[in-house]
Amino acid sequence: PAPFVIAIDGPSGSGKSSVSRAVATQLGAGYLDTGAMYRALTWWCRHTEVDLQDPAAIAHAARELPLHIGDDPQAPTVRVADIDVAEGIRTSEISALVSTVATVPDVRTEMQQRQRELIADIAGRHGACVAEGRDVTTVVAPEAPVRILLTASEEARLRRRSLEVHGTSDAAAIDATRDQVVRRDRDDSTVSQFTVAADGVVVVDTSDLDFDGSVDAVMAVVIAAR
Ligand code: C5P
């Protein structure tokens, strides 16, 4: 059978990463986190002291980025120049800077090209690939047989993100999270459309679903398409 690609986009806090990984695991598919690639580039720019005010310098770093990204949904590895950055790319510093890097047009062109090659390679080796991000359904893999926009109300997304980052979803933690999440989604949405579904993209709203319910809802879309 032809390699099967499942593209999943959504804003932060939609449950995109954890749901995508669970779906890939259930399907025995490989996995690609495109956001981790932009995070890895941001980490590399800091590490090599690239001026983040200089889009041409960031684009140059993108073309040279010595990135190795794993495809195991249960143990996603990210290495830059042979340094394990799986944790280093998740800090609040990188989260705060990543949109600056990801909104440079030449950076996106380079990363999208790499992502298309990775998806073809992963799907070829595993028979299927779950790829998640902000523009996978629309730009990176618009021909994917399954394309899903995972959404949730702002309230639900802030609660989840707050639990993830601060370990609590009390009012103070939600407020601290709001600034980061809302700003990052606003900045990101200037270059990719992930708040409304493009033609042919199936919306899965997880506002009222728990984690298992969200996985089941995505699996139902996948099974219907297979
Ligand atoms: O998904 P995650 O929150 O890890 O993504 C980190 C950042 O990478 C996003 O805020 C966005 O700036 C960028 N990104 C992107 N296009 C994608 C995936 C992520 O611009 N397909």
Image (tube, helix red, strand yellow):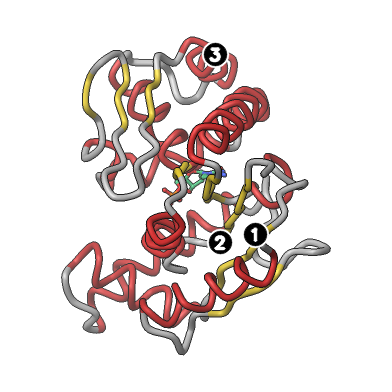
- Looking at the rendered image, the quarter that the N terminus falls into is top right
Judged from the image, the secondary structure of the residue bearing numbered disc 1 is loop
The answer to whether residue 1 is left or right of residue 27 is: right
Q: Quadrant of the C terminus?
A: bottom right
Tell me which corner region of the image, top left, top right, bottom left or bottom right, holds residue 225: bottom right
Badges 1 and 2: C-beta atoms under 8 Å apart? yes
The kind of secondary structure element at disc 2 is: loop
Q: Amino acid at mark 3?
A: Arg
Number of the label disc, if any, that sits on residue 194: 1
Q: Residue at x 52, y 62 (%)?
A: 11
116 to 181, vertically: above or below: above
Q: Earlier in the sequence, mark 1 or mark 2?
A: 2
Residue tagged by mark 3?
Answer: 63
Task: List the residue tagged with mark 2.
Answer: 10
Asked whether mark 1 and ligand 1 are closer than 8 Å, the reply comes as: no
When the figure is inspected, residue 143 is found, relative to residue 219, above or below; the finding is: above
Cα distance in 3D space between marks 2 and 3: 26 Å
Q: Nearer the viewer, residue 20 or 48?
A: 20
Q: Residue at x 24, y 73 (%)?
A: 173
Residue 203: image location, x then y, percent: 66, 73
Q: CA distance from mark 1 to mark 3?
A: 25 Å
Front in this rendered view, residue 50 or 119: 119
Mark toward the start of the polypeptide (1 vs 3): 3
Residue sitting nearer the eye, 183 or 81: 81
Q: Which mark is residue 219?
A: none
Q: Are marks 1 and 3 in contact (CB under 8 Å)?
A: no
Residue at 44% from the left image edge and 72% from the top image edge: 215
What amino acid does circle 2 point to?
Gly
Q: Position of residue 148 (x, y in %)?
A: 63, 64
